[in-house]
Image (cartoon, rainbow, N blue to C red):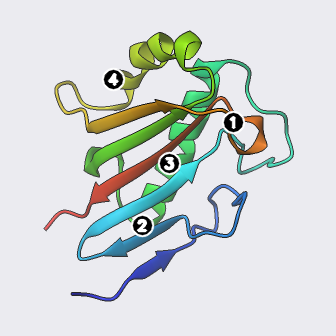
Amino acid sequence: MSDFLHHMIASGPRPVAPFSHAVESDGWVFVTGQMPTDPAAPEAPLPEGIEAQTRRVVDNLRIVLGGIGLGLEHVTMARIYLTQFERDYAALNALWPSFFEVGKLPARTTVGVTALAVGALVEIDLVARRPG
């Protein structure tokens, strides 16, 4: 088994708790759940609505993955947390496929939670696999 690589991406979102942006071992990459904060303006208000927050979260995930030479095409699993599950689940589902190549969606779990850090409506974490 290889050593763990702990990645902090300089241009990535500011962590809201003590964690690495991603941890890698044996080609597997575990990306910490990202919030809909703007890395360029971390104190700015969050985007309004589930669609805008989801886009910001996915942009943040792209930054983290890109910082270690990967992209969304390397994602094998996503976990999505929603604070307003019944209200936002359908809108999330309508938007989600737009982030991936047609027919190549990652496995996914979506759960409703009572609250998320920074008052977010959505948080997403990922598992990715480095090619080769």
Q: Is residue 104 above or below residue 6?
A: above
Q: Residue at x 41, y 81 (%)?
A: 5
Residue 12: quarter of image = bottom right
Rendering coords of residue 123 (x, y %): 57, 40
Q: Secondary structure at mark 3?
A: helix
Q: Amino acid at mark 2?
A: Ile
Mark before the other along the chain sequence, 4 or 2: 2
**Closer to viewer: mark 1 or mark 2:** 1
Residue 90: quarter of image = top left
Distance from disc 4 to disc 3, alpha carbons, whole Å, reads 15 Å
Graded by Cα atoms within 10 Å as few (under 14), some (14 to 19) or many (20 or more), the crowding at tag 1 reads some
Mark before the other along the chain sequence, 4 or 1: 4
The extreme front residue here reads 114
Residue underneath mark 4: 97
Distance from disc 2 to disc 3, alpha carbons, whole Å, reads 11 Å
Distance from disc 4 to disc 2, alpha carbons, whole Å, reads 23 Å
Mark before the other along the chain sequence, 1 or 2: 2
* In-front residue for pair 119/26: 119
Q: Amino acid at mark 4?
A: Pro
Q: Secondary structure at mark 2?
A: loop
Residue underneath mark 1: 115
Q: Secondary structure at mark 1?
A: loop
Residue underneath mark 2: 68
Q: Quadrant of the N terminus?
A: bottom left
Q: Amino acid at mark 3?
A: Leu
Residue underneath mark 3: 61
